[in-house]
Image (cartoon, rainbow, N blue to C red):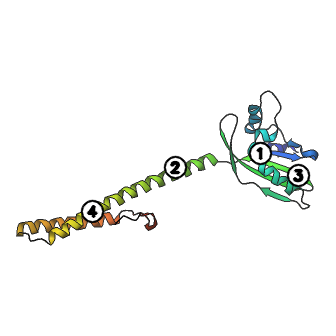
Amino acid sequence: MSELIVDLVGALDLVILERLEGGVLSRLGGQPPTWFAGNLREVHRQKSVTLLEAFPVLDAFLSDAEVFWEREEDGRLDADPCVMTLGSGKHLALATVAIKMKGRKFLLLQPIAGFEDRQHVLQRARERSLEHEQVVKRIDLARHPLRRLEQLVTELGAMELGEPQRKHLDQITGQLDALRRRVDELPQLPKAAIPKRPR
């Protein structure tokens, strides 16, 4: 591997492993990235450690890769992104690719850049969505006494009232109509989410 390629692999934080006869995976390139070498050391300090002991999330994909590598033609097989906890306790999002090229078999490992930031954004979006849902539920609860109040005002309007009481009732009705319009402009629960009320 040329010096330029070694530097490029290092800049990409990439690990390239070649699968040799007997299932041995040999790392190519210069100094291994900190996340890779550090986890190998963290998992078993007292003895040498295999790739699967250090990165157990690769187990299922390596089985698929073995089948893929046995094919005649060249190509690549991409794993779904996975998140694992390193020996240091930190989380690592890992992109994994198996490649067969000119009869040689390779496994590429690379941390997913910006994954934690994206996870944080998604987590905040979920939290905001839950907060919005709670607000909408509270608004929905406020609609029930409003309907009851409208019903009472309607019943009161059907009664015999004096002129002063009728004027007050008209003012109440006007304010109630304005309140109803404002409430109707607020977010509402989807129809499927509104529970049926007992009769």
SS category of the residue bearing label 1? loop
Name the residue rendered at 15%, 66% in the picture: 171
Mark 1 surroundings within 10 Å by alpha-carbon count, few (fewer than 14), some (14 through 19), many (20 or more) = some
Name the residue rendered at 39%, 57% in the picture: 137
Residue 47, horizontal then vertical, whole percent? 82, 29
Q: Say which residue label 4 marks.
A: 146
Mark 3 surroundings within 10 Å by alpha-carbon count, few (fewer than 14), some (14 through 19), many (20 or more) = many
Left-right relation of 112 to 120? right
The label on residue 105 is: 3
Using the image, determine if residue 173 lies above or below residue 98.
below
Quadrant (top left/top right/bottom left/bottom right) for the C terminus: bottom left
Type of amino acid at the residue the image marks with label 3:
Lys
Find the distance from the CA under tag 3 to the CA under tag 1.
Answer: 16 Å
Q: Nearer the viewer, mark 3 or mark 1?
A: 3
Type of amino acid at the residue the image marks with label 4:
Leu
Using the image, determine if residue 88 lies above or below residue 183.
above
The quadrant holding residue 90 is top right
SS category of the residue bearing label 4? helix
SS category of the residue bearing label 2? helix
Type of amino acid at the residue the image marks with label 1:
Leu
Give whichever of 89, 76 is nearer the camera. 89
Which of marks 1 and 4 precedes in the sequence? 1
Type of amino acid at the residue the image marks with label 2:
Arg
